[in-house]
Image (cartoon, grey):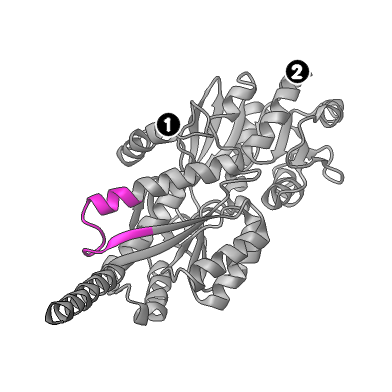
Amino acid sequence: MVQGRRLFLSGLVTAALVSSAQFAYAQNTITIGAIVPSSGPFAEWGRANTVTLDMLEKQINDGGGINGAKLKLVILDDAAKPAQAANDLRKLAGDDKVLAVAGPLTSGACEVTFPVANQMKVVSTSQASSKPGVAKANRPWAFRNTVDEGILAKTSVPYFKKAFNVKSVAIIYDAKDAVSTAIATKIMPTIFTENGIKVSNGDSPISFNTGDLDVSAQVTKLKSLNPDGVVIGADYSQAVTVLREMKRQGLMKPVIGGTPLISSAILQAAPEIPVVAPATFYATMKTPKAEKFVSELQPLLRKTSGLPKDIEPSMYDANIYEIVSMYIDAIKKADITGKPADLEADRTKIRDYMANLKGYEGFSGPVHFGADGDAVKNFFIVQGQNGSWGTKVTGCSASGGGC
């Protein structure tokens, strides 16, 4: 009987110790969420983002964690569907109790998800959205570590005009993608007109839909307009289809577009056709921080199933790496505990840290956020031709400079 009582008491002590250890571990974990499109039309970007975040999590934890606490990243797939992205944010904020969220990626998803971030009072920072005004419409919890396409086009269009003696352009775009539609139907026509360039089909730009494999009819129509240059409003995976068809039909005219064109893959579609686009990062940048990032991430990407064998880190991998690194800096510097009881206060501290951030050293130089929630950072107008990108113009997203 005595022995049984001892065993019972021993069991209680063991259970208490295990419970205490579990509680201590929970208290000693910093949880951050991420929303990426690991499936759907932008799966390559989402899967690469996931590899990037896994690498960052390991780097932080191997280096001792965050103020002694382990970093835990909870990554959800929104398949680039706006409603799913909003549901993912609700789960991350409500069920997983994350301190902040990196993502979602697309402007369409951000337009639906950012209002939810404001309702739930949790920071959400996009790694790719660049449609004008999306963060500005959802202050104060929404941020974008990207630059408005309208700002970028004001630098890329004059370069395009001068480099290729462009007097006329024609537009083709993906009508199913929010930022592509904005680039093709609103941003580019206005800026080309301001620069004295005729937009041959500004009133009726040629469209296709995400996932279309045959754009021969659209390119035939594009060719009939005989432009000096072509505007492609699409992400690189869709633009590849257009470029291949342009090459097949002999439409060897220079191409310009927005940040969604930036990818090493697009340079292989029709290497003879020059492509001009803006970027805040590209894999062959010659800066120590960028080179180190690429050297660490690229081998991991190329070992990952479902990604191209010759994939390179993208601007969106760099952006999401910066986002979570900013959150980590906030946790280290803003007296954030990570304790359940302090969740609301901790989230507010991260929001305020992001809003007042100064001098964070990103891949293209110092980064902070403007009153509209968009990143203020350096950008590059790059030209891709014969398999590689090269910087042609460097700019700053702040009006009048100040990066």
Residue 104's quadrant in the figure?
A: bottom right
Q: Residue at x 68, y 41 (%)?
A: 234
In x, y percent, where is residue 38? 56, 47
How many numbered marks appear? 2
Magenta region includes residue 125? no
Q: Which residue is drawn at 47% across and 63% down?
A: 101
Quadrant showing the N terminus: bottom left
Amino acid type at image mark 2: Arg
- Residue on which the image places disc 1: 303
In the image, 225 versus 39, the foreground residue is 39
Instruction: Answer with mark 2 or mark 1, whichever residue precedes in sequence.
Output: 2
- Residue on which the image places disc 2: 248
Q: At numbered mark 2, what does the secondary structure look like: helix, strand or loop?
A: helix
Q: At numbered mark 1, what does the secondary structure look like: helix, strand or loop?
A: loop
**Label 2 neighbourhood size at 10 Å, few (<14), some (14-19), many (20+)?**
few
Q: In this view, does 23 lie to the left or right of 5?
A: right
Quadrant showing the C terminus: bottom left
Position of residue 378 relative to residue 310, above or below, is below
Amino acid type at image mark 1: Lys
